[in-house]
Image (spheres, rainbow, N blue to C red):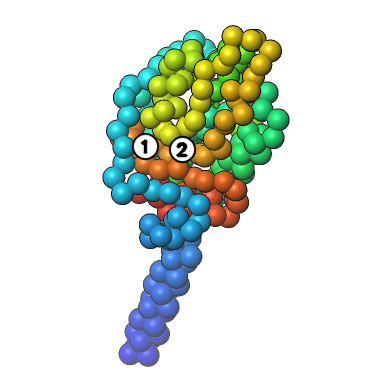
Amino acid sequence: MTIKKNLLIIAIFILTVLVLFINKLTTPRTLSTNELLINGLFLFEAPKKISDFSFFTADGDEFNKSNLLGKWTLMYFGFTRCPDECPTTMYQLSKLIKVLKEKEFPLDNKQWVLVSIDPERDSPQDINKYAKGFDPSFIGISNTRPMLLSLATQLSVNNVMPSNDNTNHSHLDNHVNNIILLNPDGEFAGFFRPPFDISRLSLTYQSVTQD
């Protein structure tokens, strides 16, 4: 009887150790600020508050600061006619979403937003269709340039007014390729810097948003 009891205790101990080991392997590691920076994520010591904004979705609904509350948001500023940087970054983000789904990482409080920096040519329908071409969960939004400039300035995204020449689109050359991270309080928490590597992007994103 004693032998059976001891074997049971040993079996429970081994099972407990195994469960803890598997949990350690599957739980994203929390990286230090320096480790995050090395892997491409600049996280502010204190998140920066931003003022309200107003953009529009393909359905004509308003997308404003309230849509950020309660969710971790990755926001990227791009445009449908972007030759290389935008599609490359959007593709990396779509790979990130795929990896997170495969790992069964909680996504209920996560969202992915593409803001058009070419609102003169990108309607909300245009930018949303472009965004969803990479992943159905993307949200594409657009509004007038003054509103774009207001939000872009707060998020340290360079953007300038276009010239009066409708054929001159040089203002889009100042496009900054950072991916903006906004926390569930609707604050500017940090940004991911290019070049984007899916392993590093996945590692840093999971570390920061796993709570």
**Residue type, numbered disc 1:** Phe
Residue 173 occupies which quadrant of the picture?
top right
Residue 112 location (% of width, % of height): 50, 33
Judge whether 168 appears above or below 105 on screen.
above
**In front of the other: 206 or 36:** 36
**Residue shown at the point (65%, 10%) measured from the top left:** 166
Residue 58 location (% of width, % of height): 54, 15
Residue 7 location (% of width, % of height): 40, 85
**In front of the other: 64 or 28:** 64
* Disc number for residue 196: none
* Disc number for residue 180: 2
Q: In terms of secondary structure, where does tag 1 sit?
A: strand
Quadrant showing the N terminus = bottom left
**Residue shown at the point (61%, 39%) measured from the top left:** 89
Q: Residue furthest right?
A: 83
* Disc number for residue 188: 1
Residue 88 location (% of width, % of height): 66, 39
Say left or right for 183 vs 26.
left
Q: Residue furthest bottom?
A: 3
Q: In terms of secondary structure, where does tag 2 sit?
A: strand
**In front of the other: 116 or 165:** 165
Q: Earlier in the sequence, mark 1 or mark 2?
A: 2
Q: Is residue 19 visible?
A: no
**Residue type, numbered disc 2:** Ile
Judge whether 60 appears above or below 92 on screen.
above
Q: Is residue 180 visible?
A: yes
CB under 8 Å between discs 1 and 2? yes
- Are there few (<14), some (14-19), or many (20+) residues within 10 Å of tag 1? many
Judge whether 127 appears above or below 185 on screen.
above
Q: CA distance from mark 1 to mark 2?
A: 8 Å
- Are there few (<14), some (14-19), or many (20+) residues within 10 Å of tag 2? many
